[in-house]
């Protein structure tokens, strides 16, 4: 083999983006199948919402949104989110502080329990509050005697929303704060910062993107929840209908254009949520990978 | 609480953990235990009669069957989508990547009416399918379509990061040893993705089993035929059959907790696998 001249090997070409790329039609076929699947199950349904909403023109669209029942539904949806998101935000920070900054027994069990609401069917999330606060429930007779209404009223809707959005902020913050460690907080404490100062000046600025990410997802779910809220709402028009419930009622009355007009508002909310989420992810990636 | 934890210079442990446990108990644990306590007031025979009634059993078959089918579809196509998003470059890739999460962000009721409009006899997709003799809306097939929609992101989002971290050297080594492209995929890449794929499958399945909002519009909700289990709970509630509703709910809850346990075990397996490399 000495006859082969000993030469520098050719500089290695960058590895092919994919091993299958050597067969030229494979990437094209796979990409086409993947995009067709996504088109059928994601893009076409999304487009259908706006198409159906505007089918009968802008007049019908605007009238459907300006309807007083739709307005009260929008207001109730916002109210539920305005209460549920901050409460679950405070909970998320407290839980993450306890779990990430301290060692204690039962930590893994606690993390599992925090995630529990995600694995419960929305219908059951509503049912459990009916069992407690409903007329036949544990506290039902007492509430009735004091003329307090929770089920089929706004407090029930807020409770159901709290339950289904419970883990969002905590599950973003816990792994993030665990990964960031305790050194910075310990340094602040040694230098004489109080607990609140450490939280406000050190911890929260460090996790702000993760926090925002959790809040965005929490808010989207709070405004869009259907099953849990449906069980506790009682569907009283103008009083206990959130926007998703209003859509169901209008849809079942065969006012399809009106139902889709209201649905398009929630679809826009979903698109804004995705845009913000992508933005926050990019910022967080930049910051945390530094 | 001091015996529970090691000493730390940081303050606020008692306050943070105390608030966490109080809030967790009030919002989640006590309400959830209400379902179990309510069920314990039933005799075993009464409980069994509620959860094994023919209409309820038919709803389990539909719910679990359609959820399994939807999760399987998402496992296959989710793996494909993750592969395409990680390994190929095409115009609009970042937009497509962001939109994969749409089912997480879109309220289920909106998804439900949109899919119904699409797959109804006069819809964009329903009309051509009807000509082929396939009815989707208001049949069990419609239930599967809705469950496929809401489970779509799970497999993509669990497989994607693992695929991104996969070392190219392994594939190059396999190929330099003479493996074909298919052998490289089936013997090297796929085994590395399997824990993530199974986790995504189970997550999609668990989500589908409890799903309500996106299904009830497209299902038709015929008892014995196209009625999902969450809907039977609602139907019982509307008839003031609280005991029956709770009994079925407890069956669902126990199933969900078993799935949650399976997911935790799968994720532990996934972490061990990734830790090895």
Image (spheres, rainbow, N blue to C red):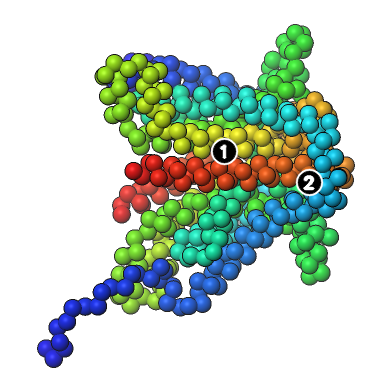
Would you call the spot at circle 2 few (<14 residues within 10 Å), some (14-19), or many (20 or more)? many
Q: Is residue B83 above or below residue B138?
A: below
Crowdedness near tag 1: few (<14), some (14–19) or many (≥20) residues, C-alpha within 10 Å = many
> In the picture provided, is A251 more to the left or to the right than B53?
right
Answer left or right for A87 relative to A227: left
Determine the image quadrant of residue A118.
Answer: top right
Where residue A32 sits: x, y (%)?
A: 58, 69
Q: Residue furthest front?
A: A58
Disc marking residue A217:
1
Residue B239 marker: none
Residue A1 lies, with reference to residue A266, above or below; the image says below
Gap between marks 2 and 1 measured at Cα: 23 Å
Residue at the spot 52% in from the left edge and 27% down from the top edge: A89
Tag 2, which secondary structure? helix
**Closer-to-camera residue (A109/A63):** A63
Q: Secondary structure at mark 1?
A: helix
């Amino acid at each position: 083999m000495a006859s082969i001249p000993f030469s520098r090997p050719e500089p290695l070409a960058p590895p092919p983006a994919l091993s299958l790329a050597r067969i030229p039609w494979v990437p094209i076929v796979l990409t086409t199948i993947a995009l067709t699947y996504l088109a059928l199950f994601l893009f076409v349904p999304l487009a259908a919402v706006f198409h159906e909403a505007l089918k009968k023109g802008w007049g019908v669209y605007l009238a459907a949104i300006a309807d007083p029942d739709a307005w009260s539904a929008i207001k109730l949806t916002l109210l539920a989110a305005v209460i549920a998101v901050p409460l679950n935000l405070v909970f998320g920070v407290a839980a993450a502080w306890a779990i990430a900054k301290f060692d204690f027994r039962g930590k893994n069990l606690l993390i599992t329990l925090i995630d529990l609401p995600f694995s419960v069917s929305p219908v059951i999330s509503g049912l459990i509050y009916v069992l407690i606060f409903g007329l036949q429930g544990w506290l039902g007779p007492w509430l009735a005697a004091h003329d307090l209404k929770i089920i089929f009223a706004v407090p029930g809707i807020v409770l159901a929303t709290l339950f289904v959005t419970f883990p969002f902020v905590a599950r973003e913050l816990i792994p993030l704060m665990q990964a960031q460690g305790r050194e910075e907080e310990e340094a602040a404490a040694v230098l004489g910062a109080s607990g609140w100062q450490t939280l406000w000046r050190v911890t929260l600025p460090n996790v702000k993107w993760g926090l925002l990410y959790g809040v965005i997802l929490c808010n989207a779910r709070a405004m869009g929840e259907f099953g849990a809220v449906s069980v506790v709402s009682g569907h009283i028009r103008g009083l206990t209908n959130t926007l998703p419930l209003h859509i169901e009622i209008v849809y079942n009355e065969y006012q399809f254009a009106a139902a889709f007009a209201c649905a398009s508002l929630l679809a826009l909310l979903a698109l804004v949520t995705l845009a913000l989420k992508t933005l926050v992810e990019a910022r967080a990636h930049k910051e945390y990978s530094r | 609480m001091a015996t529970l934890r090691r000493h730390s210079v940081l303050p606020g442990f008692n306050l943070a953990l105390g608030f966490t446990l109080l809030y967790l108990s009030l919002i989640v644990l006590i309400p959830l235990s209400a379902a179990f306590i309510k069920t314990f007031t039933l005799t075993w025979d009464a409980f069994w009669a509620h959860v094994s009634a023919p209409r309820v059993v038919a709803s389990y078959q539909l719910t679990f069957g359609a959820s399994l089918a939807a999760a399987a579809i998402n496992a296959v196509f989710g793996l494909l989508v993750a592969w395409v998003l990680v390994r190929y470059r095409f115009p609009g890739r970042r937009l497509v990547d962001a939109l994969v999460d749409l089912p997480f962000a879109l309220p289920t009721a909106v998804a439900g009416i949109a899919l119904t409009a699409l797959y109804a006899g006069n819809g964009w997709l329903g009309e051509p399918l009807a000509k082929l003799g396939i009815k989707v809306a208001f049949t069990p097939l419609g239930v599967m379509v809705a469950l496929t929609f809401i489970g779509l992101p799970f497999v993509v989002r669990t497989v994607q990061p693992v695929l991104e971290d996969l070392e190219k050297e392994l594939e190059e080594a396999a190929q330099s040893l003479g493996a074909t492209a298919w052998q490289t995929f089936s013997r090297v890449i796929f085994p590395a993705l399997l824990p993530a794929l199974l986790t995504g499958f189970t997550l999609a399945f668990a989500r589908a089993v409890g799903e309500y909002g996106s299904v009830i519009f497209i299902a038709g909700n015929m008892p014995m035929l196209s009625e999902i289990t969450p809907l039977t709970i609602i139907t019982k509630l509307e008839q003031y059959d609280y005991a029956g509703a709770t009994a079925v709910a407890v069956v669902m809850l126990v199933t969900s907790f078993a799935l949650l346990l399976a997911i935790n075990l799968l994720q532990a397996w996934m972490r061990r696998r990734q830790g090895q490399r």
